[in-house]
Image (cartoon, rainbow, N blue to C red):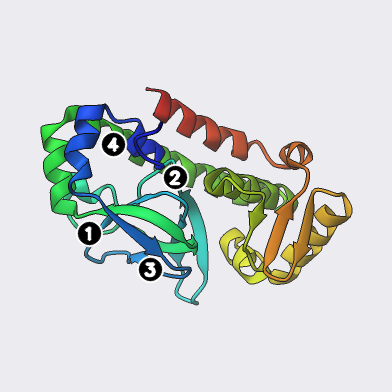
Amino acid sequence: MPQSPNRILNALPQNIFAAMETHLRPEQLAFGRVVAETGGQVDKVYFPYTCVISLVVEMQVGDLIETAMVGRDGVANGTSALDGKVALHKGVVQIAGAAATIGPEALRKLAREFEPLHSLLIRHEQVLLAQAQQSAGCNASHTVEARMCRWLLRMRDLTQSDDLTLTQELLAQMLGVRRTSVSLVAGTLQRAGLIRYRRGNIHITNVEELEQAACECYLTVKGHYERLLAI
């Protein structure tokens, strides 16, 4: 039986997880909750179980564009355990659900005491950076359809469900496109039998075809996380 639903915590040696466990607190995160503000003080570090947190860039005009997703294979605000308490990004809960939280001071102390934990947190930050870089290249090079397929597959991996509670407004915001573009692509994917879309809900009906329609960024990012957790 896994020691934690979060794959980062689950990858830790048992003695390190046992030392962390006394500091971890379960928490339910609601949709839209802001867990970090750019330049703001970090008061909690989040290890998602079933929730998904989007790391976003907030533009002056008010747009939020996603650069990375953090779910059950990651940690949000983990850098606070290494070099301070200031967030370098805005984090918003996009899929409500459960997480384990820990105070930054406690995690920083544990990371200093246990080198494998410190190393895992650093490697995770490297993976987050690679994900953000991949997202920038994806937004510049790939079609909205390929990007949307990639996004849905990543979300499916993190939620472990074919049913996703998502509005067209949210998808458009995360992909950095107009809502009309999302509506057209969703219609195309539905007619092709890849998804079923109803107001506020997307059901993935054909994972294999969705993977074929997605850009290579999906497998690239997935590979980064699999290598991280295999070490």
Give the side of residue 216 with respect to residue 15, left or right.
right
Q: Earlier in the sequence, mark 3 or mark 2?
A: 3
Q: CA distance from mark 1 to mark 2?
A: 23 Å
Q: Considering only order in the chain, which callout, 2 or 4, is on the residue closer to the N terminus?
A: 2
At 66% from the left and 55% from the top, the residue drawn is 163
Secondary structure beneath label 1: loop
The image shows residue 6 at horizontal and vertical percentages of: 39, 42
Residue under label 1: 86
* Amino acid beneath label 3: Val
- Residue that numbered label 2 is attached to: 72
Disc with the residue nearer the chain's start (4 vs 1): 1
Whole-angstrom CA distance, mark 4 to mark 3, is 23 Å
Relative vertical location of residue 95 with respect to residue 141 in this rendering, above or below? below
Give the CA separation, mark 4 to mark 2: 17 Å
Residue 59 percent across, percent down from the top left:
46, 70
Q: As displayed, is residue 192 above or below residue 30?
A: above
Q: Which residue is mark 4?
A: 122
Mark 4 vs mark 3: give the one in front. 3
Label 4 neighbourhood size at 10 Å, few (<14), some (14-19), many (20+)?
some
Residue 231's image quarter? Answer: top left
Q: CA distance from mark 3 to mark 2?
A: 18 Å
Q: Which residue is mark 3?
A: 34
**Which residue reaches farthest top?**
231
Q: Nearer the viewer, residue 115 or 72?
A: 72
The amino acid marked with disc number 4 is Ile
Residue type marked 2: Arg
Disc 4, SS: helix
